[in-house]
């Protein structure tokens, strides 16, 4: 009786895995302008929508590919990535798009490939009395306490990119710009204060900022799925899409 | 052979069985201390289930079929845990509960705010400033959370955040908090601990926030996207105006309040079948 109950519990817990359809790649980007050219190249396209998040899947360059849209912010990015990972567990997550430079050595059109990711939205300020003002340059960073096996929290500053995918990404030959390894930062922020950007770069080691890449990487980390990020500095959606498509071609 | 047949049968039955039997209420807490009393109330027959690294416990509390979820802290953890919880257990109501920092000066340790609204207050665009001009957070422009409305395909901005379920709100406001007072209010979420009183005052004024914490607004957004009813309870565990530092055991007050709420909350009717 107990063994039957245990077996039933196991199957109940494993049911999503039983229902899941695996894929080779999960491609994640912010908007239709970036995703549409990829979707148009898919064959055998299927579309699913849940809770406002959409998943496209089909075949591309001989691989089974799933796509989802982040809307350019962490919450939608994490939710959409979670759904895609649950329904169609991939071998690799590729998050791609445009970004703003934190590293002053970067130039418009440079392609930053992720050595690692930093979700830099965590902060703690010091006790300051009324009238004492607010100054983000005095804040301390607050890493994410990621849930890990055994109901433990693991304080995490950086999510590391998959080394095999990174090696492939470093060899890409974009039409414009250099390919540079770096740290992709993300938060639901547009930082335009030069001193704060310098502070973020000093504390979080960020090369660029965007609205989702590190949060997608964090979600992939929760599920133990490898991830790579590709970002074109001050680029166009078309340039980001071209970079991602060249990666899909090169990846085995 | 019999085992193989049983296993095949279960594989065939599990998915439709799950879809047909949603739980009534998903109760969430970010930390173990925030769910301890609720977990104990599930009793020894609760069934534990792990989805990814996240733990869920399924059982009954009084008249309700309940799943308790340990979400972990912050947007990343709680958004994943909520999507998994909704997809797996199809709850009719989500109760997100835990600790918070007071932003309204009248709040004291162990007071509970019931979320009339929950929102994400950490998003912004800063103005252009050249090197040497510093950083001035009180001049940043907030950016509302957006969700895509699936039928029309439009992105909708939720500047006021997400409203708590009116029935759950009414029941919560007549539920006893044995350790403090109960108020309806606005709960703000971000991966932040703000102790600069000028910024606390700014966010209380800008968003109408009574307390700050790290999950409610994000969980509310996901619940809204799925059309699942939602309510949040937040006990005051630290009060910067009073110089009260973080007191983790305040979590017990919110868990006990949640149990009182579950006792008061009427049984949830199954959804009306579509003709």
Image (cartoon, rainbow, N blue to C red):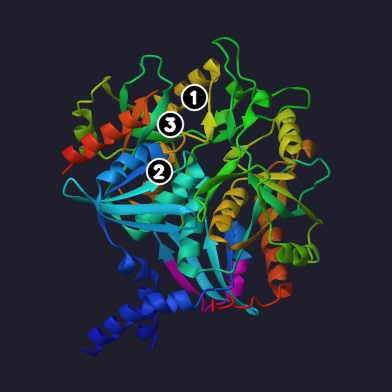
Secondary structure, mark 2, is: helix
Same-chain status of marks 1 and 3: yes
Q: Which mark is residue B30?
A: none
Which residue carries the number 3 mark?
A185
Mark 2 vs mark 1: in front: 2
Query: Is residue B232 one of those drawn in magenta?
Result: no
- Tell me, yes or no, whether the two marked residues, 1 and 3, touch with CB atoms within 8 Å: yes
Give the residue drawn at x 34%, y 34%.
Answer: A116
Task: Let me know if marks 2 and 1 both belong to one chain.
Answer: yes
Kindly indicate the quadrant of the structure image that contains residue A10: bottom left
Is residue A21 among what the camera can see?
yes
Quadrant holding the C terminus of chain B? bottom right
- Does mark 3 fall on the same chain as mark 2? yes
Residue A42 place in picture, x, y as percent: 25, 48
> Is any part of residue A153 visible from this angle?
no
Classify 10 Å Cα crowding around label 1: few (below 14), some (14-19), many (20 and above): many
Label 3 lies in what chain?
A
Secondary structure state at the residue bearing disc 3: strand
Of tags 1 and 3, which is closer to the observer? Answer: 3
Judging by the rendered image, the residue that carries numbered circle 1 is A200
Q: Where residue B109 appears, x then y in whole percent?
A: 77, 49
Residue B244 in the image: x percent, y percent? 75, 41
Is B134 located above or below residue B79 in the figure?
above
Q: Which mark is residue A216?
A: 2
Q: Which residue occupies 52% across, 52% down?
A: B152
């Amino acid at each position: 009786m107990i063994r039957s109950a245990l077996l039933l519990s196991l199957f109940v817990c494993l049911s999503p895995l039983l229902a899941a359809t695996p894929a080779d790649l999960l491609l994640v980007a912010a908007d239709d302008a970036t995703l549409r050219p990829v979707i148009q190249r898919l064959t055998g396209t299927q579309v699913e929508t849940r809770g406002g998040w959409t998943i496209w899947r089909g075949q591309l360059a001989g691989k089974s590919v799933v796509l989802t849209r982040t809307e350019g912010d962490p919450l939608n990015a994490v939710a959409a990535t979670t759904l895609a990972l649950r329904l169609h567990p991939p071998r690799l997550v590729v998050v791609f798009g445009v970004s703003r430079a934190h590293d002053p050595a970067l130039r418009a059109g440079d392609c930053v490939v992720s050595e690692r990711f930093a979700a830099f939205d965590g902060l703690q300020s010091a006790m300051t009395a009324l009238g004492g003002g607010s100054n983000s340059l005095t804040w301390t960073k607050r890493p994410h306490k990621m849930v890990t096996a055994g109901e433990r929290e693991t304080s995490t500053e950086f999510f590391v990119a998959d080394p095999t995918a990174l090696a492939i990404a470093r060899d890409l030959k974009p039409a414009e710009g250099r390919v540079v390894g770096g740290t992709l930062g993300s938060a639901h922020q547009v930082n335009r204060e030069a001193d704060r950007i310098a502070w973020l770069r000093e504390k979080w080691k960020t090369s660029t900022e965007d609205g989702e890449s590190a949060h997608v990487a964090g979600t992939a980390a929760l599920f133990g799925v490898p991830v790579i990020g590709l970002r074109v500095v001050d680029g166009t959606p078309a340039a980001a899409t071209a970079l991602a498509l060249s990666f899909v071609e090169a990846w085995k | 052979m019999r085992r193989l047949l049983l296993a095949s049968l279960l594989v065939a039955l599990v998915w439709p069985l799950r879809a047909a039997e949603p739980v009534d209420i998903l109760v969430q807490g970010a930390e173990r201390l925030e769910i301890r009393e609720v977990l104990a109330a599930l009793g020894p027959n609760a069934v534990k289930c792990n989805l990814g690294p996240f733990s869920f416990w399924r059982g009954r509390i009084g008249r309700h079929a309940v799943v308790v979820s340990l979400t972990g802290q912050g947007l990343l953890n709680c958004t994943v845990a909520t999507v998994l919880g909704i997809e797996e257990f199809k709850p009719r109501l989500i109760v997100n509960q835990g600790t918070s920092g007071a932003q309204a000066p009248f709040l004291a340790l162990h007071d509970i705010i019931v979320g009339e609204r929950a929102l994400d207050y950490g998003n912004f665009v800063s103005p252009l400033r050249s090197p040497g001009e510093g950083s001035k957070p009180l001049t940043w422009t907030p950016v509302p959370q957006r969700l895509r409305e699936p039928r029309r395909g439009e992105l909708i901005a939720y500047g006021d955040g997400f409203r708590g379920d009116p029935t759950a709100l009414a029941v919560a406001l007549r539920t006893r908090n044995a350790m403090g007072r109960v108020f309806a209010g606005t709960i703000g979420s971000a991966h932040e601990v703000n102790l600069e009183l000028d910024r606390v005052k700014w966010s209380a004024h800008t968003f109408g926030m009574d307390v700050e914490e790290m999950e409610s607004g994000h969980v509310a957004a996901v619940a809204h996207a799925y059309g699942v009813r939602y309510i949040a309870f937040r006990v005051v565990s630290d009060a910067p105006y009073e110089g009260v530092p973080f007191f983790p055991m305040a979590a017990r007050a919110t868990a006990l309040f949640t149990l009182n709420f579950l006792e008061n909350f009427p049984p949830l009717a199954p959804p009306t079948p579509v003709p």
